[in-house]
Image (cartoon, helix red, strand yellow):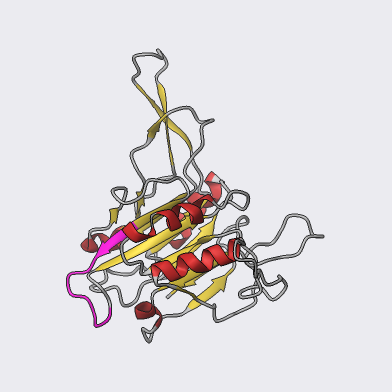
Amino acid sequence: MNSISRPKQSAPRSLQNLTILSFNARKSWETTSIVLDKCAGYVDIIMFQEPGWKGVRRQPSTRNKEGDVACGPPLHNSWRPFTEAFDNRDEDRAARRVLTYINKRLDVFKPQLRSDIIKHRDTSIVTLHIPQPRRGIPHEFNILNVYNDGETHAAVHELRRISETLPRISLCAGDFNIQDRTWDEGAVNQIRPSSPFMRLQELFTDLEIQYVHPINRGTPTRIPDDENLRASVIDLVAASAALINQEAFLLELIPPPSLLGHWCGRAL
């Protein structure tokens, strides 16, 4: 397990120097909790795919004398989880597959879960409000978190369906479960118009964002448990031209801060 020790940061006055982590926790409560704890001192935003999610308490019920199970994610003193209110439902029902945490240092930017725009278990938008934006950066910094199921591609389909109603996206990151030679030299090019890759490219075009190559290009983001299977790149980051053109912007793939999960995409 990696040992991470970074000095705590004070509240930023602008969004110029943010560290954003995108990470698939493989539904592990322990992994989600470890990442929150280890990254609290130096990461500003964590975009989880398949976060830990379970029953966390019982609350009064008119139908169940033992109370209804309230399900939710891990909580941490340094982080605000941007999800709707904890679900009053059984643990066996489908849980959310994306969850964005914002470090409390960023409270000054009044982060907001945009459930008024999209309600879907596989994608979410969180908006940071910028009182004095820099040139080329809008007043709202919109972060799109995506888990795209490899069988149904439901997230990409839903986002394409409502793309005209979405705000301008600044940064999109997630586990897309799509292989293509554009970002994975070991994969083949998908040239069929109806292929998942082409649908994703059309979505990026609709949202006016573009795929960002990491500085350590070629690093696999998913290492299969089966050693006989090929490691691949399925975790992606896309951003607006305004953000990419910022002098300090870069994307780096780093090992996960726990024993489980995909490699992380870290945008600086």
Q: Is any atom of residue 231 visible in this view?
A: yes
Across and down, in percent, residue 187 comes to 71, 70
Instruction: Give the residue displayed 24% in from the left and 80% down from the top.
Output: 134
Instruction: Give the residue displayed 45% in from the left and 62% down from the top.
Output: 39
Taking 224 as reference, is 72 above or below it? above
Q: Along the line of sight, which residue is nearer the eye, 12 or 174?
A: 174
Across and down, in percent, residue 259 comes to 62, 56
Looking at the rendering, the stretch of residues picked out in magenta corresponds to: 126-136
Horizontally, residue 82 falls left or right of residue 220, namely left
Image quadrant occupied by the C terminus: bottom left
Q: Along the line of sight, which residue is nearer the eye, 52 or 1?
A: 52
Q: Is any atom of residue 2 visible in this view?
A: no
Horizontally, residue 164 falls left or right of residue 192, namely left
Across and down, in percent, residue 13 comes to 23, 73
Residue 129 colored magenta? yes
Q: Residue furthest right?
A: 228
